[in-house]
Amino acid sequence: MDPTASLTQPALWPLTAIVFLPALVAAFLSLPIIPKAREEFIRWTSLLTMAVVFVLSLWMAWPQLFGATGPAQFRLGEPGMQAVVKLPWIDAFGIEYLLGVDGISMPLVVLTTFLSMLAAAASWPITKHVKAYHVLFLLLVTGMLGVFVSLDFFLFYVFWEVMLLPMYFLIGIWGGPRREYAAIKFFLYTLLGSVLMLLAILMLYFTSDLRLLSDDQLIAAHVVSPAVEGAARADALTAVRSAKNPVHTFNLLALAQLGQLPSSPFAAAEVWGMSLEKWAFLLLLIGFVIKVPVVPVHTWLPDAHVEAPTPISMILAGVLLKLGGYGILRICYPICPGAGLAFAWLVCGLGVVSMVYGAFAALAQKDFKRMVAYSSVSHMGYVMLGLGVWSAVAGNEYRWDAWAQGVNGAMFQMLAHGISSAGMFFMVGVLYDRVHHRNLEEFGGIFNRMPVYSGLAVAVFFAGLGLPGLCGFIGEVLVTLSSWNYSRTLAVISAFTVILTAAYILWAIQRVYLGAEYKGPHGDHLTPITARELAIAAPLVFFAILFGVAPQILFNYVTPTVNRQVETLADWTRRVHDAPPVAPAVAQRGADGVGSR
Amino acid sequence: MNLVSASWLPPLFAAGLLGEPVSVTHYLVVGAILFTAGIVCMAIKRNALGVLMGIELVLNGANVNFVAFASPYLRGEGAVSLGLDGQVIALFVILLAAAEAAVALAITLNFYNNHSTVDIDRADDLKG
Amino acid sequence: MDLSSQLPLLLGLAWLAPLASFVAILFFGPRMGQHGKNAAWVATAAILTSFVLSLVAFGGWIGSHPVQAVSHGAHGAHDSHGDEAAVGAHGAGHGPAAHSPIAYSGDWYTLYEGGNLKLSIGWYIDALTILMFVVVTFIATCIHVYASGYMHDELHDVTDHEVHLSGGGHLHRPGRFPRFFQALSLFCFSMLGIVIAGNLAMVFIFWELVGICSWFLIGFYYERKSASNAANKAFIVNRVGDFGMLIGLMALWGALGTLHFADTTTTAADGAATTQPGLFSLVRPAAGGHALRVPDGMVKFAAAKEVAQIAADHAANPADAASEVASKIDDWRSMGMGRWLLFVAGVGIFCGCVGKSAQFPLFVWLPDAMEGPTPVSALVHSATMVAAGVYLVGRFYPVLSPDVLLVIAYVGAITLFIAATIALVANDIKRVLAYSTVSQLGYMMLALGVGGWSAGLFHLVTHAFFKSLLFLCSGSVIHACHTNDMRKMGGLARVMPWTAGTMLVGCLAIIGAGIPFVIGLSGYYSKDAILAQALSFAQANPAHWILYVAVAGGAFLTAFYMFRLWFMTFAGRPRDHHIAEHAHESPAVMVAPLVALAVLAVVAGWTLPGGFGLANLLEQARPAGTESTMTGGFVFGGLTFPAEHESHEGAIHVTATLTAFTTAAAGVLLAAAMYLWRILSPTLVAYMFRPLYRFLANRWYFDELYHAVFVVPALGIAKLASSTDRGVIDKIIDGLAWSARQLAGIDAWIDRTLVDGLVNATANATWHAGLELKKLQTGHLRQYVMFIVVGTVALFVLASLLFRTTLAG
């Protein structure tokens, strides 16, 4: 047995705790010994669990805050995968319990734990089946965190599905009047995505062959743990080498290594007249963009948001949408670089269409929450555009820094949107808790009734508007600037969105917060913001400002990893894609890639 | 010998048989007559006792056949006979007939006690 | 201490002081004295600090770089200044005679860095920056002082008579005194941020921030629907301009990879310094005598296909490809590649300026912005923020190609004409001033567009003084009369002598009054410079004579509407006695700033003996390569931009001055004839030109046009998008779900009828067969016997028929 499979890996317990503590507490809470009536106890348990998990994730991400730097903690500036945990799980198929974090996933993990903590605090107004709610909520958190840290495709898929089901119930039971419709719509959409993803996973798995990788690559991909030395390492390598049949793998890092080989097995295999690489890319892309979501597979989002309770909306907008972008960044491009290059127009086009379409749709909404939901569609379009220019080439000049700017911008936009959209949904929720309606035409004068709340809300909405000094600006401007090198048309359209964004956000602010008097029902319930609400809103606003004025805090994490990945792929493009023709098929693809530019 | 073949029927009626030395065939004719009489008796008698008698006739018609087939003399030279087995089966049939008669009479008696009659046409309780 | 490190420190502090005030008032505003009364002092102290620091910086500057009369003789000395960008300490060595701007630049703070790309917060300080700092902070200080008097209503509960509640009453609300100063401080911070910005990204950041401050300030009375509408309109219209600006930024960033104005020098850990050229030296390389040319990056960008071909040819050796590309760049450049990119970049950046400086076609927001309190109109919407567009054109001047300059000139001309005509008939005192501002900004743009870099920026500075003065005076009037409508004023000069006097100074300054060739108010000098340059340009390019006509005609219109305003307000007899009786001179705290500004409105244009003056100060910052005549034009044909000093030549200068004087005098006389001496009846004139009057009074129907052309379609598309979601995409999804259910229904039907039916039918048949067979079981023994017999016989017969062969044997 692999010696590193022992339980002494430094990151094993911290990472496992971050992922599974919520599930463990969920299991505990679901025990019959916890009476349903002890709602306060359940709420506090849930909140405290999330706080502990948040602190744990912070301990990993920001060791300086806790003094000593342990081997399980994140080392800033190191681009590679850190805190890797590797245990065998299902040996027969080479499925492993393989976890790890890098500059892409670490900030997303912290964002998830942070937002989940706030969402747990925002769950106080929920009074229906409190116990079941919190059990499902904690399970959901485990699913989300698991997706971000798993490096085994199978494990990834398992977590992906784990996340789906609690969400279905959370919307379907605790939602608004049309909750069943919204929940089933959400479920079917995402299930469709997962099925296509599963298809792609199996395609990749059965085409993969670890024997194609060099020793160094095997070690870099953690197929053979770098911690193993000497004879044990040689044995492990020989075990792979001496296999008579192809050694399949679910290891995402190894799959990426395979995909970037000059003789990538994925590019070589052909299915129905198109390379398997392209099939896999498209299937995965559909799976992920449904989650992002992009037009035209976005209509689950407004319904799900409108019907979901406030904390679930926060999680949905703040974290779930990021899973799509994360998947594209982590899986689609590194594993299928050729397809990524060929379909860059698709990814960018989808992004730009979403930006404009979402903004226009937001402009027309009468429902406050629906408007915010469409703003998410529009904002996530920037993420798609930024990820898409990843494979943009200006002539044959691989200005990787321009691509890297787009991807860094997209990453930043994801994190910033996590803050601002969660904030916006919370702000809508605060009003809804008081007056029980969301009709934009029936607000007005909130600024005079709830000044502190309105000030915070306006700040959060301005962050969504992309105002400089707030977190929304940096990502948008980096993505927009980087898109010019890929396509002038798309760049102009994406720049056009700034007008629409200003229009719908300012118009909403005017209708809700400004004005002389409140026009809707339950006007007497418009009480000032409570301490609990303030404790949720204030951190969101604080981070919106902090990331706006000091974006390096996030870039310090993101940039090294993203830059290295982009450099690797730029190098791949030069080395493999545009290489002097070796085989006719390769030459054909090379010519296409250049000609389309 | 071909019992099923229809070729033996005309000589029987042509009285050619009566001129022959006694052979199995003659016994078979007697057995057939007995058997047929029994069947007819069973079919037409409404009295349960009559039916029982018909049964006896049928059984004994069969017995005649068994005995006839058992006799080596009747079978003629070189032919294979049942031998002693035929006798044994006949004895077995007699035994069986006695037992059967006892049981049947008991049923009849019971039937009579219940219905005050031995008319089997009245005994249609087993009608489906 | 070295100037190169001193200036960023001083101006940086001056820039940040208002931010500190903003933060302080944000958190502690309501607790600053009764109703936050002391917030005014906090904000004023902060901006005063900025002003003092700016003055110190200014002193330091003129100490090191004495302002002298510029001799326009010796050009051609460029070659001796290879390091013309004068980055950091290098610049200190240059005297004013050097025909390259003296500038200091550097970075404070990095927002994003990846590869060679870097977005940062930094500074670019030259004479223009310092001048703008002094002007902005000075005017802002005056306006802060003024506002602490003007806004005193906000110190206690306010009844807003313009807001009608559904209950029938007026709105009562607590005062918002600290809020006002909080926003004002944030505005000052943002505005100074634009001025000091060392790169275009930073300009864009603060560009947006002043926009949002403007939104806050216009919407200060946010209970009023009109105010919040105006605020939104201002921001959204500005965003339309920003859309263009973003395109300009992308064109620069995508091709050149930098947004820094000046070269940046980075020192690596091993001490090796590398210099990355900034925009200025990329477009006007020192090696080429600062002549404008399409930068290499843009040429390469435009020639992407050729570059790709070369790279493909040299796939084996990328170094060869790079050197071949480098050798081809000059060929490509001479073929005109990348020109459109430079054009797009220039026009794009100018689009942002069009929005912010309220130029045609985006000027519609500025008159509506007068919904804000008057000090805001004076500071934000006349003197500083709207001038930022002009400032940026001036700052960005080296990168603007001749075609872009022509676009700028025409946009300026159209703007100045349209706005002036609307101002002729406006009756709201602040709207007249607003249109006047738009018109004057058009002047500045035109000046910059015809090559008058110094003339345009000179006018920017003088205009800032007299226009803020005019606005503050109008505020004083409004404060006294509680109305904006000039038709209800009149004869106020008697009750408000200070206001009337200072406003007269302002009016004289704006029309450029002066004794020709002797002395004049500040506007006299700046307007003359513009006229002279326009004339010079028109002479060099006869096809564009209309620009000169626009300037001269504009001068006439300006004189007319300004004196119409003054006469209607202050001269004659009161039209509304109720208002006149209650009118009073404003308190000293409001009058003092008026006087201070009036003094500057008079003297700002003067040049002291020895050459100290604004014009010569600006010359120190003159962009390299603009001191000599520039020719070119890729799109609009050959254009000649005469060097500015040529417009000082006698022939042109005298003509221009006399034109200015005559047109202005004519305008004043016409205004006096109509509104002072009443020789001509304004109503009669309006009646005679009724269609024209209505056209102008409705502001050329621009609002209606834009509403119909942009707002309605945008909302229509929005509705379409939303209904597409619900009506098409959702219908498709629901339809899919529905058809899945139908399919399931068919499946269930098949199960029920076919599969189950078959099984049931078998069972049925068996059942019925059983029922039929049951009849055979009669219970009659005798029948059974018959059956047996018949059956046996039948079997025998069957067997004998079927199996004859087998049994026969």
Image (spheres, grey):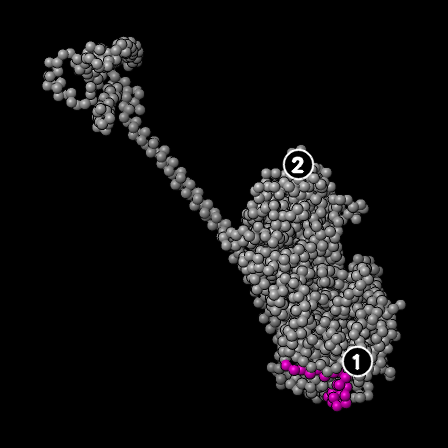
Instruction: Say which element carries label 2.
Output: loop
Residue A310 visible from this viewpoint: no
Tags 1 and 2 on a common chain? no
Q: How far across and down, in percent of the image, does residue A296 sit?
A: 55, 57
Q: What stretch is highlighted in magenta?
A: C637-660
- Chain at tag 2: A
The residue identified by callout 2 is A1
Residue shown at the point (63%, 78%) measured from the top left: C635
The residue identified by callout 1 is C77
Q: Does the magenta stretch include residue C642?
A: yes
Query: Between residues C412 and A528, which one lies in front from this camera angle?
Result: C412
Which corner quadrant of the image does residue A571 belong to? bottom right
Q: How far across and down, in percent of the image, does residue C774 sit?
A: 30, 27
Q: How far across and down, in percent of the image, does residue C709 sit?
A: 58, 71
Q: Is residue C27 magenta?
A: no
Instruction: Say which element carries label 1.
Output: loop
Query: Image check: A82 left or right of C762?
Result: right
